[in-house]
Image: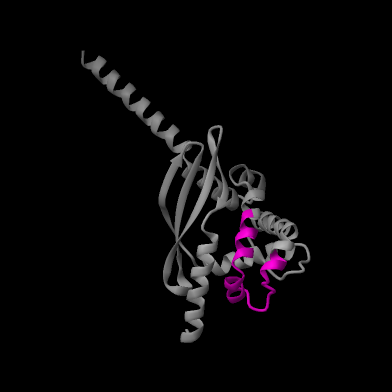
Amino acid sequence: MKKLIILIVLVAVAVGAYLYFYKVRTAPEYSLMQAYQAIDDHDPAAFERYVDVNSVTGNLVDDVAKNGSALGVLNPGGMAMTGALRLLKPQLAQAARKEVQRYIETGSAEAAAAAAPNRLVNVSMMGLASKVVGENSKFYGVAYSREEGEQALVGLKFSQPRYDTTLVLEVKMRKRDDYWQATEITNTGAILQHVARMEKRRLVGGK
């Protein structure tokens, strides 16, 4: 009888562990972890399984174009005319994709910026991202995760040492069989405006 009870408990534990592991593996956060691992492994193909680079960069260019004033603060010396950015969206999106691919291959933001084709508008997406996130930024974990049918929103919290604060990047994801794929950073514009305001205060304060 005791052996039967022990066997039932072991089976229950095994089933529970499997279900938990399956839930973790099929959660949006797990797919983002896999995308991060692909960056560590310098594996663009694996990264693009979990990140729709075309969609993310296309939306990113749209958000940057809508926030020309913030771009002028964060990208001094670069042309930040909203009309020009929108007009050149295909070229900028292509440049951003090349930057992302090169960054994953090399792990170097400088190499990524150099890999982008010549731009009529002096805007490097990787360079801009480094100013928003910061070189010594630390990831503080998932702030929230909400699944809504075939879509999910995941908030990623990270530090911004330059301004002694934290920011939350919201990633939109869509279901793909047994994994999730990032399609958009939904709050890029708000973060650009927020960081631009902090940069203005830093410059005025002389820090």
Apparent side of residue 73 relative to residue 144 in the rendered image (left or right): right
What is the span of residues highlighted in magenta in the rendered image? 59-85
* Residue at the far left in the pictured view: 1
Residue 74 image offset from top left, x and y in percent: 58, 73
82 inside magenta stretch: yes
Q: Nearer the viewer, residue 30 or 194?
A: 194
Residue at point 64%, 45% (across, down): 48
Asked if one can make out residue 52 in the rendered structure from this viewpoint, the answer is yes
Dividing the image into 4 quarters, which one contains the N terminus? Answer: top left
* Residue at the far front in the pictured view: 83
* Residue at the far top in the pictured view: 1
Residue at point 68%, 75% (across, down): 78
Apparent side of residue 2 relative to residue 94 in the rendered image (left or right): left
Residue 97 image offset from top left, x and y in percent: 69, 55
Apparent side of residue 39 relative to residue 149 in the rendered image (left or right): right
Q: How many marks?
A: 0
